[in-house]
Amino acid sequence: MPRPAGNRTSFLSFLRDTALLTGIHLRIVRWAGTFTVLVSFALPVAFLILMRLMNPDASPDQVRLYISGNMVNAVVQATLTMMAQTVAGQREARTFAYYVSLPIHKMSLILSLLLAYLLQSLPGLIGVLLVGNLVFGVWLMPHWSIIPIVLLLGASLSGLGALIGIRARNAMAANALGLSLAFMSMFVLPVYYPIEVLPAWLRPLAYAFPVTYGAHGIRMSFLGPQEAGLLVDLLALMGFSLATFLAVTYGLRWQDE
Amino acid sequence: MRKLYKDGKILANDDVSVEIRAGEVFGLLGPNGAGKTTLVRQLLGLLRPTSGRISVMGYDVVRQPSGAKHLIGYMAQRPFGLHQLTVQEAMEFTARLRGCEKTDAHRQAVALMEELGLAEHRRRILMRLSLGLLKAVCFGMAVAGHPRLIFLDEPTESLDPGRRRVLWNRIRSMSQQEGITFLLVTHNINEAESVLDRVAIMGEGRVLALGTPRELKRTLDDRLRVEIAPQEGCSTSPGLPALEEMGEVIRLKNDSLVVLTQRANLSAVIDLIQRLIGMENLAEFRVADATLEDVYIRLGGGKFA
């Protein structure tokens, strides 16, 4: 028999529902899973090969930039782009009407979406790291500090993707917006190069996007423990994650109107 | 309660006041746009009423939504977009999200799949099912997890006759044996009549009539319905004035007529039809006991047909 209504708001119920909903989302994406992994893997790997061909004598610093940049790229593709499309698609298909008829908390649903897409980004991320080493003939392994950086980067980008999905007119528009933002973040923001390379007028824009901190943090993780810089990246990414989570919680119309 | 849409320009529900008793199967009948689905969506908490109050087993739907949602199951008119789940997963996850333990959820899903003829499809993803099978899955999802009040919006639409019978039987047994309350929105009036305890007939956002099917049919005074539909190029108009004197005449689409008449007048009505319209000009001629559908058609003055 179901739990009585009074217990439903307990933290354990919240966690249980979040885990169940994450299971649903992971099952929903499993049929597109190959495609998603391919999207988050193929493009960064293609870039890695291109970079190797264009710069066969890349210095260790440059190799670090290339590999870390493409790892960020993998996370961007699997979270921001896919999340935007999925949320808009679920809105169109009235899937939220199903969720709203269940005794679950809205935050549970949002958290489960973030978790599912975060988990989904991991195969591409690890794949890019391994292929990057292979292509450049090096053995670069990150410090454990990469784990919170990647988790928080994925969470902020998933949140950003969810916001696009909530606001976009339909799934096609969400996809176009997500892709535009993804490409902008790859080439205009300091993902493949340090922020110092950017013209001064563009830097404030770079600081307003989580990928800047994610790219810096991942890059630093290849150099070992860099506590001072890492703390700034972690705090900034935490702030972005929290802000997008709250924005999605507020922005997602649980009801139809 | 009232519900206004589009900045108060469209009145979807007007002065609706209904009490549904625990354990009854309550039907909402009415044409498209009568406000039935809007009413159900407010009961679910998907829409807020503009004014008034909705209470589900003591829980205010707007103020205490989680308490109310804990008690309800919902089958929407259009299937939810969880197309990538398998049949079994859809039912099990729904039961678990309604608070059931894993083994109980599994047991329920297996029993429901067996009963609804879905056992052989249990590993198929919803996207690959026919609309009829998908509706059967949606019914399973609505009843999974032991909800006490279940909203079903057009549950038998697209279902084959066998599954329809299973579904009506299931509704009846859950209501009678387990005391589950059902709120049913349907156009399939004659089929639903056998399971409905009470019915509200809606039109233009209002409740036009409310009662048991027997009470509503009693308003027809045990009359017979004579339905005639003309052949293409023919008309029933020549017989209209005379037929109106023999009973209540409802004009349907395509110049068809329903005459609700006393049993004693039947031979006179047939005679009028023969003389004034001509049997050879009719594509259809039917005589039957008046049904709940006739109450519904009559209330709409033919507009509901």
Image (cartoon, coloured by chain):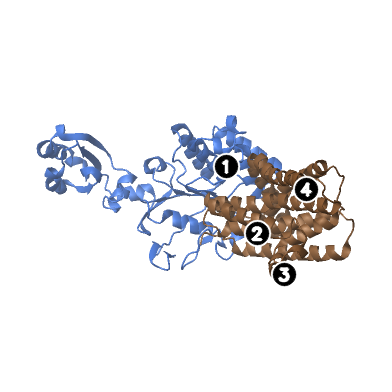
> Which colour represents chain B?
blue
User: What amino acid is found at the position of numbered circle 4 in the picture?
Assistant: Asn
Instruction: Report how far apart the C-alphas of labels 3 and 4 lie in the structure.
Output: 27 Å
Disc with the residue nearer the chain's start (4 vs 2)? 4
User: Of the residues tagged 1 and 2, which is closer to the observer?
Assistant: 2
Q: Is residue A184 visible?
A: yes
Contact? badges 3 and 4 (CB < 8 Å): no
User: Of the residues tagged 1 and 3, which is closer to the observer?
Assistant: 3
- For label 2, count other residues whose C-alpha is less than 10 Å away and answer few (under 14), some (14-19) or many (20+): many
- For label 4, count other residues whose C-alpha is less than 10 Å away and answer few (under 14), some (14-19) or many (20+): few
Instruction: Report how far apart the C-alphas of labels 1 and 2 lie in the structure.
Output: 25 Å
At horizontal 13% and vertical 35% (from top left) the residue drawn is: B278
Q: Is residue A16 visible?
A: no
Contact? badges 4 and 2 (CB < 8 Å): no
Residue under label 2: A160
Q: Which chain is brown?
A: A
At horizontal 63% and vertical 57% (from top left) the residue drawn is: A181
For label 1, the SS is loop
Disc sitting over residue A200 in the figure: 3
For label 2, the SS is helix
Q: Mark 1 lies on which chain?
A: B
Residue under label 1: B83
User: What amino acid is found at the position of numbered circle 2 in the picture?
Assistant: Leu
Q: Mark 3 lies on which chain?
A: A
User: What amino acid is found at the position of numbered circle 1 in the picture?
Assistant: His
Residue under label 4: A55
